[in-house]
Amino acid sequence: MSSKDLDIETLSIDQLQVFMAAAEHGSFSAAARALGRTQSLISYAVQRLEEQVGLVLFDRAGYRPRLTEAGQALLPRARRIVGEVSAFHALSRGLSAGVEAEVCITVDAMYPMCLLLRALLDFRDRWPAVSPRVLVGNMGAAVEQVLDGHSLLGLVNPVATQAPELELRPAAFITMVPVAAPHHPLARHEGELLTEDLRDHVQLVLTDRATRLSQPDRGVFSSQTWRLNDLGAKHSMLLAGLGWGGMPEHMVRDDLTAGRLVQLPSPYWDPHRTLPMSVAYRRDARLGPAAQWLATHLSSLVDEAVPTPGAQRVQKHAAA
Protein backbone atom coordinates (compact mmCIF):
# COMPACT_ATOMS: atom_id res chain seq x y z
CA MET A 1 0.00 0.00 0.00
CA SER A 2 1.45 3.38 -0.96
CA SER A 3 1.19 6.53 1.12
CA LYS A 4 -1.29 7.84 -1.47
CA ASP A 5 -3.64 4.96 -0.63
CA LEU A 6 -3.61 5.73 3.12
CA ASP A 7 -6.88 7.15 4.41
CA ILE A 8 -5.93 8.95 7.61
CA GLU A 9 -9.58 9.10 8.65
CA THR A 10 -9.47 5.32 9.22
CA LEU A 11 -6.77 5.70 11.88
CA SER A 12 -8.05 5.87 15.44
CA ILE A 13 -6.63 7.13 18.71
CA ASP A 14 -7.30 3.71 20.17
CA GLN A 15 -5.00 2.10 17.60
CA LEU A 16 -2.23 4.53 18.44
CA GLN A 17 -2.70 3.90 22.16
CA VAL A 18 -2.43 0.15 21.57
CA PHE A 19 0.69 0.71 19.46
CA MET A 20 2.22 2.80 22.27
CA ALA A 21 1.29 0.26 24.96
CA ALA A 22 2.83 -2.62 23.02
CA ALA A 23 6.04 -0.66 22.47
CA GLU A 24 6.28 0.55 26.07
CA HIS A 25 5.44 -2.76 27.75
CA GLY A 26 7.57 -4.90 25.45
CA SER A 27 4.95 -7.46 24.46
CA PHE A 28 1.37 -7.80 23.27
CA SER A 29 0.44 -9.80 26.35
CA ALA A 30 1.80 -7.12 28.72
CA ALA A 31 0.01 -4.43 26.71
CA ALA A 32 -3.21 -6.45 26.97
CA ARG A 33 -2.89 -6.62 30.76
CA ALA A 34 -2.15 -2.90 30.99
CA LEU A 35 -5.16 -1.98 28.85
CA GLY A 36 -7.49 -4.63 30.28
CA ARG A 37 -8.02 -6.39 26.97
CA THR A 38 -7.33 -9.77 25.46
CA GLN A 39 -4.06 -10.41 23.68
CA SER A 40 -5.89 -11.25 20.47
CA LEU A 41 -7.50 -7.81 20.40
CA ILE A 42 -4.10 -6.16 20.89
CA SER A 43 -2.55 -8.23 18.10
CA TYR A 44 -5.45 -7.45 15.77
CA ALA A 45 -5.27 -3.69 16.50
CA VAL A 46 -1.54 -3.60 15.76
CA GLN A 47 -1.96 -5.70 12.60
CA ARG A 48 -4.76 -3.45 11.41
CA LEU A 49 -2.64 -0.36 12.02
CA GLU A 50 0.25 -1.89 10.06
CA GLU A 51 -2.08 -2.62 7.16
CA GLN A 52 -3.39 0.93 7.15
CA VAL A 53 0.04 2.60 7.18
CA GLY A 54 1.58 0.03 4.88
CA LEU A 55 4.52 -0.64 7.21
CA VAL A 56 5.64 -3.38 9.59
CA LEU A 57 5.87 -1.79 13.03
CA PHE A 58 6.97 -4.82 15.03
CA ASP A 59 9.43 -7.59 14.21
CA ARG A 60 7.76 -10.77 15.51
CA ALA A 61 10.62 -13.18 14.67
CA GLY A 62 11.92 -13.33 18.24
CA TYR A 63 10.42 -14.32 21.57
CA ARG A 64 9.11 -10.80 22.06
CA PRO A 65 8.02 -8.36 19.36
CA ARG A 66 10.55 -5.62 18.74
CA LEU A 67 10.01 -2.28 17.08
CA THR A 68 11.24 -2.04 13.53
CA GLU A 69 12.97 1.08 12.26
CA ALA A 70 9.60 2.28 10.96
CA GLY A 71 8.00 1.59 14.34
CA GLN A 72 10.75 3.53 16.14
CA ALA A 73 10.27 6.46 13.77
CA LEU A 74 6.48 6.54 14.16
CA LEU A 75 6.29 5.98 17.93
CA PRO A 76 7.18 9.61 18.90
CA ARG A 77 4.56 10.86 16.43
CA ALA A 78 1.95 8.58 17.94
CA ARG A 79 2.78 9.86 21.41
CA ARG A 80 2.48 13.44 20.22
CA ILE A 81 -0.90 12.83 18.57
CA VAL A 82 -2.32 11.04 21.61
CA GLY A 83 -0.97 13.76 23.88
CA GLU A 84 -2.52 16.52 21.77
CA VAL A 85 -5.88 14.76 21.71
CA SER A 86 -5.76 14.33 25.49
CA ALA A 87 -4.92 18.03 25.87
CA PHE A 88 -7.78 18.90 23.50
CA HIS A 89 -10.26 16.96 25.63
CA ALA A 90 -8.89 18.42 28.87
CA LEU A 91 -9.12 21.97 27.55
CA SER A 92 -12.63 21.46 26.15
CA ARG A 93 -13.80 20.03 29.48
CA GLY A 94 -12.22 22.94 31.31
CA LEU A 95 -13.74 25.56 29.03
CA SER A 96 -17.18 24.03 29.40
CA ALA A 97 -16.71 24.23 33.19
CA GLY A 98 -15.63 27.89 33.04
CA VAL A 99 -11.86 27.31 33.30
CA GLU A 100 -9.72 29.83 31.42
CA ALA A 101 -7.60 28.84 28.43
CA GLU A 102 -4.86 31.24 29.56
CA VAL A 103 -3.86 33.24 32.63
CA CYS A 104 -1.63 36.28 32.07
CA ILE A 105 0.50 37.57 34.95
CA THR A 106 2.96 40.49 35.06
CA VAL A 107 5.84 40.05 37.49
CA ASP A 108 7.91 42.85 38.98
CA ALA A 109 11.59 42.13 38.33
CA MET A 110 12.26 42.32 42.08
CA TYR A 111 10.04 39.30 42.81
CA PRO A 112 12.04 36.12 43.57
CA MET A 113 12.06 33.99 40.44
CA CYS A 114 12.48 30.81 42.49
CA LEU A 115 9.08 31.39 44.12
CA LEU A 116 7.47 32.10 40.75
CA LEU A 117 8.92 28.90 39.27
CA ARG A 118 7.66 26.88 42.21
CA ALA A 119 4.20 28.38 41.81
CA LEU A 120 4.16 27.69 38.07
CA LEU A 121 5.21 24.07 38.58
CA ASP A 122 2.34 23.63 41.01
CA PHE A 123 0.03 25.48 38.61
CA ARG A 124 0.98 23.15 35.75
CA ASP A 125 0.21 20.11 37.88
CA ARG A 126 -3.13 21.53 39.03
CA TRP A 127 -4.26 23.11 35.72
CA PRO A 128 -2.46 21.25 32.90
CA ALA A 129 -4.82 22.56 30.21
CA VAL A 130 -4.35 26.26 31.13
CA SER A 131 -1.43 28.16 29.60
CA PRO A 132 0.27 30.84 31.72
CA ARG A 133 1.59 33.95 30.02
CA VAL A 134 4.32 35.67 32.05
CA LEU A 135 5.40 39.27 31.48
CA VAL A 136 8.09 41.16 33.41
CA GLY A 137 7.98 44.83 34.38
CA ASN A 138 9.41 47.30 36.85
CA MET A 139 7.61 49.15 39.62
CA GLY A 140 4.67 51.18 38.31
CA ALA A 141 4.89 49.68 34.83
CA ALA A 142 4.02 46.26 36.22
CA VAL A 143 1.05 47.73 38.08
CA GLU A 144 -0.23 49.52 34.98
CA GLN A 145 -0.26 46.23 33.06
CA VAL A 146 -2.86 44.97 35.53
CA LEU A 147 -4.79 48.25 35.67
CA ASP A 148 -5.03 48.40 31.87
CA GLY A 149 -6.22 44.80 31.62
CA HIS A 150 -3.15 43.55 29.75
CA SER A 151 -2.56 41.13 32.63
CA LEU A 152 -5.14 39.54 34.87
CA LEU A 153 -2.72 39.15 37.80
CA GLY A 154 0.37 41.00 38.94
CA LEU A 155 3.21 40.47 41.38
CA VAL A 156 3.90 44.08 42.22
CA ASN A 157 5.73 46.39 44.62
CA PRO A 158 4.21 48.99 47.01
CA VAL A 159 3.47 51.49 44.24
CA ALA A 160 0.30 49.42 43.73
CA THR A 161 -1.15 50.98 46.89
CA GLN A 162 -1.67 54.15 44.81
CA ALA A 163 -4.33 52.31 42.79
CA PRO A 164 -7.57 51.83 44.78
CA GLU A 165 -8.94 49.77 41.88
CA LEU A 166 -6.65 46.90 42.84
CA GLU A 167 -7.15 44.10 45.33
CA LEU A 168 -3.81 43.32 46.99
CA ARG A 169 -2.67 40.20 48.82
CA PRO A 170 0.77 39.84 50.48
CA ALA A 171 3.14 37.79 48.30
CA ALA A 172 6.73 38.29 49.51
CA PHE A 173 9.07 40.55 51.46
CA ILE A 174 12.29 41.57 49.70
CA THR A 175 15.41 42.70 51.54
CA MET A 176 17.40 45.37 49.69
CA VAL A 177 21.16 45.72 50.18
CA PRO A 178 23.67 48.31 48.86
CA VAL A 179 26.48 46.64 46.91
CA ALA A 180 29.50 47.39 44.76
CA ALA A 181 32.23 45.43 43.02
CA PRO A 182 35.22 44.60 45.29
CA HIS A 183 37.50 46.87 43.24
CA HIS A 184 35.13 49.85 43.57
CA PRO A 185 36.45 52.68 45.80
CA LEU A 186 33.47 52.40 48.16
CA ALA A 187 34.19 48.71 48.73
CA ARG A 188 37.65 49.62 50.05
CA HIS A 189 36.37 52.37 52.33
CA GLU A 190 37.01 51.80 56.03
CA GLY A 191 34.08 52.26 58.40
CA GLU A 192 30.50 53.31 57.72
CA LEU A 193 29.67 55.11 54.50
CA LEU A 194 28.02 58.45 55.18
CA THR A 195 26.22 60.76 52.76
CA GLU A 196 29.39 62.61 51.84
CA ASP A 197 31.06 59.30 51.00
CA LEU A 198 28.23 58.11 48.75
CA ARG A 199 27.39 61.28 46.86
CA ASP A 200 30.67 61.50 44.93
CA HIS A 201 30.32 58.08 43.29
CA VAL A 202 27.99 57.04 40.48
CA GLN A 203 24.85 55.34 41.81
CA LEU A 204 22.99 52.95 39.54
CA VAL A 205 19.25 53.55 39.93
CA LEU A 206 16.38 51.48 38.56
CA THR A 207 13.96 53.75 36.73
CA ASP A 208 10.25 53.39 36.10
CA ARG A 209 8.54 53.11 32.71
CA ALA A 210 5.14 53.89 34.21
CA THR A 211 3.26 56.86 32.76
CA ARG A 212 0.65 57.24 35.51
CA LEU A 213 1.92 55.45 38.58
CA SER A 214 5.48 56.44 39.34
CA GLN A 215 7.51 55.70 42.41
CA PRO A 216 9.62 58.53 43.87
CA ASP A 217 13.33 57.97 44.26
CA ARG A 218 14.18 56.09 47.43
CA GLY A 219 17.66 55.43 48.71
CA VAL A 220 19.26 57.78 46.18
CA PHE A 221 22.23 59.52 47.82
CA SER A 222 24.57 60.29 44.95
CA SER A 223 24.60 63.47 42.89
CA GLN A 224 25.68 61.28 39.95
CA THR A 225 23.11 58.72 38.87
CA TRP A 226 22.90 56.37 35.95
CA ARG A 227 19.31 55.35 35.24
CA LEU A 228 18.38 51.88 34.00
CA ASN A 229 15.02 50.24 33.36
CA ASP A 230 16.32 46.66 33.54
CA LEU A 231 17.35 44.98 36.79
CA GLY A 232 19.54 42.45 34.99
CA ALA A 233 21.48 45.25 33.29
CA LYS A 234 21.93 46.97 36.66
CA HIS A 235 23.30 43.73 38.12
CA SER A 236 25.81 43.37 35.28
CA MET A 237 26.95 46.99 35.62
CA LEU A 238 27.43 46.55 39.36
CA LEU A 239 29.60 43.48 38.73
CA ALA A 240 31.63 45.50 36.22
CA GLY A 241 32.29 48.21 38.82
CA LEU A 242 30.47 50.96 36.90
CA GLY A 243 28.77 52.19 40.06
CA TRP A 244 27.13 51.17 43.31
CA GLY A 245 23.47 50.60 44.09
CA GLY A 246 20.80 48.66 45.91
CA MET A 247 19.81 45.15 44.84
CA PRO A 248 17.43 42.49 46.16
CA GLU A 249 19.48 40.41 48.58
CA HIS A 250 18.30 37.11 47.10
CA MET A 251 19.61 38.12 43.66
CA VAL A 252 23.15 38.94 44.85
CA ARG A 253 23.56 36.42 47.68
CA ASP A 254 25.76 34.16 45.57
CA ASP A 255 27.80 37.16 44.39
CA LEU A 256 28.38 38.28 47.98
CA THR A 257 29.41 34.78 49.03
CA ALA A 258 31.78 34.41 46.08
CA GLY A 259 33.25 37.90 46.54
CA ARG A 260 32.03 39.20 43.19
CA LEU A 261 30.15 41.94 45.06
CA VAL A 262 30.61 43.53 48.47
CA GLN A 263 27.82 44.75 50.73
CA LEU A 264 28.43 48.39 51.65
CA PRO A 265 28.12 49.36 55.32
CA SER A 266 25.85 52.37 55.58
CA PRO A 267 23.56 53.57 58.39
CA TYR A 268 21.02 54.66 55.78
CA TRP A 269 20.20 51.07 54.79
CA ASP A 270 18.23 49.34 57.53
CA PRO A 271 19.05 45.60 57.26
CA HIS A 272 15.65 44.79 58.78
CA ARG A 273 13.65 46.91 56.34
CA THR A 274 11.93 44.91 53.62
CA LEU A 275 10.12 45.75 50.41
CA PRO A 276 6.64 44.18 50.47
CA MET A 277 5.42 42.55 47.27
CA SER A 278 1.76 41.81 46.56
CA VAL A 279 -0.44 39.72 44.32
CA ALA A 280 -2.67 42.23 42.55
CA TYR A 281 -5.79 42.09 40.41
CA ARG A 282 -8.56 44.51 39.57
CA ARG A 283 -11.45 44.48 42.02
CA ASP A 284 -13.89 44.42 39.11
CA ALA A 285 -12.08 41.59 37.29
CA ARG A 286 -13.78 38.23 36.93
CA LEU A 287 -11.14 35.70 37.88
CA GLY A 288 -11.69 32.22 36.56
CA PRO A 289 -10.96 29.15 38.69
CA ALA A 290 -7.33 28.86 37.54
CA ALA A 291 -6.55 32.54 38.14
CA GLN A 292 -8.20 32.43 41.56
CA TRP A 293 -6.16 29.36 42.47
CA LEU A 294 -2.90 30.97 41.29
CA ALA A 295 -3.53 34.20 43.20
CA THR A 296 -4.24 32.27 46.39
CA HIS A 297 -1.26 29.97 45.89
CA LEU A 298 1.17 32.85 45.30
CA SER A 299 -0.08 34.55 48.44
CA SER A 300 0.45 31.34 50.42
CA LEU A 301 4.18 31.52 49.62
CA VAL A 302 4.60 34.86 51.41
CA ASP A 303 6.49 33.37 54.36
CA GLU A 304 8.67 31.06 52.29
CA ALA A 305 12.43 31.47 52.50
CA VAL A 306 13.98 32.76 49.29
CA PRO A 307 16.89 30.55 48.19
CA THR A 308 19.29 31.63 45.49
CA PRO A 309 19.63 29.77 42.18
CA GLY A 310 23.03 28.54 43.35
CA ALA A 311 21.54 27.16 46.55
CA GLN A 312 18.86 25.39 44.53
CA ARG A 313 21.51 23.72 42.36
CA VAL A 314 23.43 22.52 45.43
CA GLN A 315 20.26 21.06 46.92
CA LYS A 316 19.41 19.33 43.65
CA HIS A 317 22.84 17.68 43.37
CA ALA A 318 22.79 16.69 47.03
CA ALA A 319 19.43 14.99 46.53
CA ALA A 320 20.73 13.18 43.47
Image: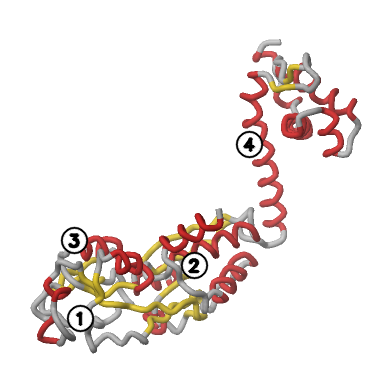
Mark seen at residue 240: 3
Front-lying residue, 284 or 169: 169
Please report whichever mark, 4 or 1, sits nearer to the chain's N-terminal start: 4
> Could you tell me residue 164's position as x and y percent?
45, 84
The residue singled out by tag 2 in the image is 115
Q: Give the mark nearest the N terminus, 2 or 4.
A: 4
Task: Determine the residue positioned at 46% across, 70% down.
Answer: 154
Location of residue 192 (image quadrant): bottom left
Mark 3 or 4, nearer chain start: 4
Question: Can you tell which mark lies on residue 144?
Answer: none
The residue singled out by tag 1 in the image is 220
Report helix, strand or loop for mark 1.
Answer: loop
The reply, left or right, for residue 258 in relation to residue 195 is: right
Is residue 25 at all visible to an observer of this figure? yes
Q: Are marks 1 and 2 in contact (CB under 8 Å)?
A: no
| Residue 267 percent coordinates (x, y) | 23, 89
**The N terminus lies in quadrant:** top right
- Residue at horizontal 74 percent and vertical 20 percent from the top: 58
Mark in front: 2 vs 3 = 3
